[in-house]
Amino acid sequence: AIDAARAPGSSRVFVLAEGRLDNAPNEQWANGIHSTKFLDDVLIITGNLADSYRALERAFTCLRPKFRRLFFVPGNHEAWITRPEQGTFPDSLAKLFAIMELCDALDVDVFPAAICSGVYVVPLLSWYNASFDVPDPFPDPAMQANKHCKWPVDQEQQLWRYMLRLNQESLDKPYYGTVISFSHFAPRTNCPVLMEPGARKISGCAELDEQVRAVRSCCHAYGHTHCRFNETLDGVKYIHRPLLVDLGLDGSVSKDPLLCIFDGQALCFDMVETYDEAPPGPQCP
């Protein structure tokens, strides 16, 4: 409600996917984002920002002052129980709820909100459903991709339903104008995934697309797949571009630009430089 009366055209929307700021080069990239260039803008984070709670807190602390608003949904990496966390969180659900409380404390948005008059950002929680792999729609018991997760419900049959159910209240709000939704997992089987055995089983949830359309989204950003995508399907623009940071032999990091998906007036797919000069070394607290 705080921005519902903000003038149209006053906010750009950027997306950060697969940020992995617990990796030193990626953290250095984030630290080098210009401190004032994006203060009128919004950053959407589609999950997999960090594995551990402490690393996630450090990442938020680094990014939050650089943007007017941060929106976030957790990815599968945030659900991992790292070795130091095994005595802190009884399961992954407890950790995710703790992350939600952390977001509240650090002024990171996890619920839908207007960012200016007639423009809304809608986070949607998600988990994968093995039926996303249409030719072989069954879980593979040998898959170990999320072995560090510990769920109090069945990960294959119940968890994706539970996550979608948590979105229910967000679906009933009176959105109008430009609605930008986002999730961690891909919402349509058209979305490309890595060509690895079993990858499609753990990459998306087709039932999520029903919620994308229920909120009248015109653009949906997602993460996880590591396959770039920018295509309009049945009236909705689907976008994924993972962060790509290279470490040079001299220890310097590449200046990967930030993806802008809304320029204040219309949807776009523009790459915007984040630095005015070479990024400095790690300084995040």
Image (spheres, helix red, strand yellow):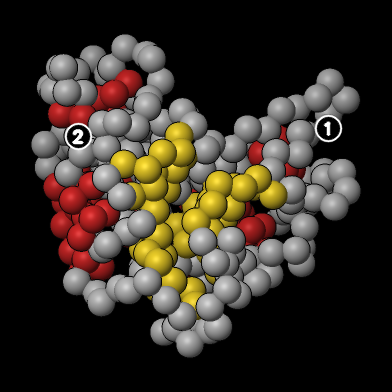
Q: Residue 124 occupies which quadrant of the picture? A: bottom left
The percent coordinates of residue 115 (x first, y second) are 48, 74
The percent coordinates of residue 200 (x first, y second) are 29, 24
Q: Residue 202 occupies which quadrant of the picture? A: top left
Q: Does residue 87 show up?
A: no
Disc 1 marks a residue whose amino acid type is Ser
Image check: 201 left or right of 196? left
Crowd rating for badge 2 (residues with CA inside 10 Å; few <14, some 14–19, many 20+): many
* Quadrant of the frame with the C terminus: bottom right
Disc 2 marks a residue whose amino acid type is Asn
Image check: 60 left or right of 105? right
Nearer the observer, 121 or 167? 121
Crowd rating for badge 1 (residues with CA inside 10 Å; few <14, some 14–19, many 20+): some
Image check: 249 left or right of 188? right
Nearer the observer, 168 or 251? 168
Q: Mark 1 points at which residue?
A: 252
Secondary structure beneath dot 1 equals loop
Q: Residue 129, which numbered label?
A: 2
Nearer the observer, 94 or 210? 210
The percent coordinates of residue 95 (x first, y second) are 36, 52
Residue 72 higher or lower than 52, as above or below = below
Work out how far the residue at label 1 is from the one at label 2, CA to CA, in angstroms.
39 Å
Q: At x 44% / y 71%, what residue is drawn? A: 119
* Quadrant of the frame with the N terminus: bottom left
Q: Does residue 34 show up?
A: yes
Q: Residue 16, which numbered label?
A: none
Q: At x 21% / y 66%, what residue is drawn? A: 171
